[in-house]
């Protein structure tokens, strides 16, 4: 590249020749100058900002941090208050559960010494409401939650004990023959000594007779297992059920059997139909209750079933002998 210089001060015109190296060095010089100027400007700016503006920035930063801290504390305090309120509600519910547990324990016949913890008893509590001057700390709240958890665990054990006792009582009552086998009058021939209808002699009647029409349903007086369902020369068509605890019941003179030996039956399940088979003078059900093979007075078990008779049949008084 040729550059011609013309000036009044120059007698003659001069020419300059620029090569690529000249252009490169010129560009490099300009670039270095720009970098140096930028560095100097940055240095001066930071220095002045540190001397003049830094206190303002620090105050602003402190103010922002303080506001954020205040909001965080307010949020934590609000959550602690909500959790404390919920904890109070749970404690009130636990107190009501104590009362219910004590009533259930009394109904189940559980003695106080059989209850594992003193907290299961319902203690009277009350008084005016006096709020604390400060909210609960996280440590205090955690301690209260741990205590409530311990009380709930103890209460769960107590309720489980009561439930087991009630279940045992329910099973025991379900196995006792306290349900009428036939919805009919049952004083036709009571338990005890009587005049035998066939021989006319004094003889022991080991059951209760229910007078009913042929085909009337005969139901199990309690849940159990059928140990016999067959014809007997004196009982006729006979069903015998084992109810556990050495209790058995017999249902005699049936016209038809609905169950088989080894079958499990529920309380109130139909097991046979009234008939007059065997040693019988007419359609009726001969019902027996035995304990360890010895005949018992069925009336002792059927008193609770008298009120379950349908209207019109009449719950007649039991004749004890």
Image (cartoon, helix red, strand yellow):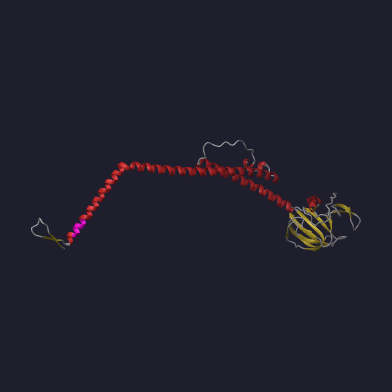
Q: Report the front residue among 46 and 164.
A: 46
Residue 121 position in % (x across, y down): 64, 41
The answer to which image quadrant residue 11 occupies is: bottom left
Q: Residue at x 46, y 44 (%)?
A: 71
Check residue 150 for magenta coloring: no
Q: Is residue 317 left or right of residue 134?
A: right
Which range is magenta?
Answer: 23-28
Q: Report the front residue among 266 and 20.
A: 20
Q: Report the front residue among 5 and 207.
A: 5
- Name the residue at the front extreme: 8
Q: Is residue 31 left or right of residue 185?
A: left
Residue 211 position in % (x across, y down): 85, 57
Q: Residue at x 80, y 64 (%)?
A: 256
The answer to which image quadrant residue 117 occupies is: top right
Above or below residue 87? Residue 199 is below
The answer to which image quadrant residue 127 occupies is: top right
Q: Is residue 174 left or right of residue 188?
A: left
Secondary structure character of the magenta stretch overall? helix
Q: Residue at x 66, y 41 (%)?
A: 113
Residue 108 position in % (x across, y down): 69, 46
Q: Is residue 296 visible?
A: no
Check residue 27 for magenta coloring: yes
Q: Residue at x 70, y 45 (%)?
A: 107
């Amino acid at each position: 590249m040729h550059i011609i210089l013309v000036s009044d001060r120059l007698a003659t015109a001069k020419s300059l020749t620029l090569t690529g190296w000249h252009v490169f060095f010129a560009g490099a010089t300009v670039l270095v100058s720009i970098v140096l100027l930028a560095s100097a400007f940055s240095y001066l700016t930071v220095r002045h900002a540190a001397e003049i503006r830094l206190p303002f920035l620090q105050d602003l930063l402190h103010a922002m941090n303080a506001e954020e801290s205040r909001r965080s504390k307010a949020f934590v305090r609000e959550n602690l208050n909500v959790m404390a309120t919920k904890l109070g509600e749970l404690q009130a519910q636990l107190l009501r559960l104590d009362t219910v547990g004590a009533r259930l324990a009394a109904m189940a016949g559980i003695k106080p010494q059989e209850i594992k913890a003193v907290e299961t008893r319902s203690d009277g509590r009350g008084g005016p409401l006096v709020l604390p001057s400060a909210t609960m700390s996280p440590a205090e709240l955690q301690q209260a939650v741990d205590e409530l958890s311990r009380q709930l665990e103890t209460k769960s054990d107590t309720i489980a004990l009561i439930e087991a006792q009630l279940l045992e009582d329910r099973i025991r009552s379900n196995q006792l023959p306290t349900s009428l086998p036939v919805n009919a009058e049952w004083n036709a021939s009571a338990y005890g000594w009587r005049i035998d209808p066939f021989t006319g002699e004094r003889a022991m009647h080991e059951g209760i007779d229910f007078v009913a029409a042929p085909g009337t349903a005969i139901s199990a007086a309690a849940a159990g297992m059928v140990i016999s369902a067959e014809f007997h020369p004196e009982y006729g068509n006979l069903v015998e059920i084992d109810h556990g605890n050495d209790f058995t019941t017999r249902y005699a003179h049936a016209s038809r059997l609905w169950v088989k030996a080894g079958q499990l039956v529920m309380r109130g399940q139909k097991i046979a139909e009234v008939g007059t088979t065997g040693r019988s003078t007419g359609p009726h059900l001969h019902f027996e209750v035995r304990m360890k093979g010895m005949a018992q007075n069925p009336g002792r078990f059927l008193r609770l079933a008298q009120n379950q008779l349908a209207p019109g049949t009449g719950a007649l008084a039991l004749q004890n002998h």
